[in-house]
Amino acid sequence: MLNKKDILPIIIIIIALILGIQLYPKLPDLVPSHWNSQGQIDSWSSKNFLVFFMPLLALAIYLLMTFMPRIDPLRKNYEKFSKVYFLFKVLLSLFFIALYLFMLAAAFGFKMNIIYFILPVFSLFFIAIGVMLPKIKRNWFIGIRTPWTIHSDAVWNDTHSFSSKIFVISGIISFLGIFFPKYAFAVFMTAILTAAIISIVYSYFSFKNQGGFK
């Protein structure tokens, strides 16, 4: 359910949309919509897509995440990490808004390298997730959801405590990749995928060490 604390993030998204609508007449008909791993623009879209899609997507995701706990079989657990869940929703929304503003600036011809935007933002987001992981309780929608973590609170808590450190380290390594622009994307993908794989594998061994299915 929406509550008072959800009002501010939604207002911020709406303000971003209003800003885009105000700038709409001044935007070129075609605007950058995708960059390759070297930070070069390789795809263009209509300004309608840019102005309306990104903020509406941010709003849709925020609302979806707000109502998802209602259909989660483990919905009662959300009360145990409601502050962290709210923070996660806000950070995700701010990422979309920041990306929206970046794309608007690029559409107006500002020379901007997306590598120096997207990688630091993603890296810091990954570090933030690492900090939040130990506080997330068992659920079906966010966190490290494997058959073994979903099965047991003990495995879930152990995996998230361990993976917290892995995510933070991976985020730091990914951030350092910006000092090597040619390899930044490869460093980022390697760090993130490694963290994900290690977390999945660890959840299995944690499950086995705690007796497996009983």
Image (cartoon, helix red, strand yellow):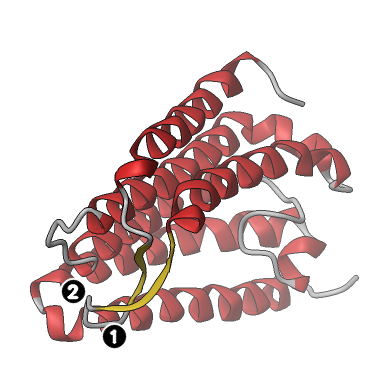
Vertically, is 45 above or below 99?
A: below
Mark carried by residue 38? none
Residue at the top extreme, as displayed: 4
- Quadrant position of the N terminus in the picture: top right
Which residue shows up at 84% across the image and 47% down it? 72
Vertically, is 90 above or below 188?
A: above
Residue hosting label 2: 177
Q: Residues within 10 Å of mark 2 (few under 14, many from 20)?
A: many
Towards the viewer: 126 or 89: 89
Which residue shows up at 45% across the image and 30% down it? 18
What percent of the width, then of the height, locates residue 205?
Answer: 63, 79
Q: Are marks 1 and 2 in contact (CB under 8 Å)?
A: yes
Vertically, is 4 above or below 55?
A: above
Which residue shows up at 18% across the image and 74% down it? 177
Within the image, what quadrant is residue 130 found in?
bottom left
Towards the viewer: 129 or 44: 44
Q: Residues within 10 Å of mark 1 (few under 14, many from 20)?
A: some
What percent of the width, then of the height, locates residue 35?
Answer: 32, 75
Towards the viewer: 85 or 50: 50
Which comes sooner in the sequence, label 1 or label 2?
2
What percent of the width, then of the height, locates residue 186?
Answer: 29, 85
Label 2 sits on a secondary structure element that is helix
Q: Is residue 126 left or right of residue 110?
A: right
Mark carried by residue 186? 1
Vertically, is 79 above or below 50?
A: above
Inspect the image, locate mark 1, and give the three-letter code of the amino acid beneath it: Ala
Which residue shows up at 89% across the image and 48% down it? 73
Label 1 sits on a secondary structure element that is helix
Q: Is residue 98 left or right of residue 164?
A: left
Q: CA distance from mark 1 to mark 2?
A: 8 Å
- Quadrant position of the C terminus in the picture: bottom right
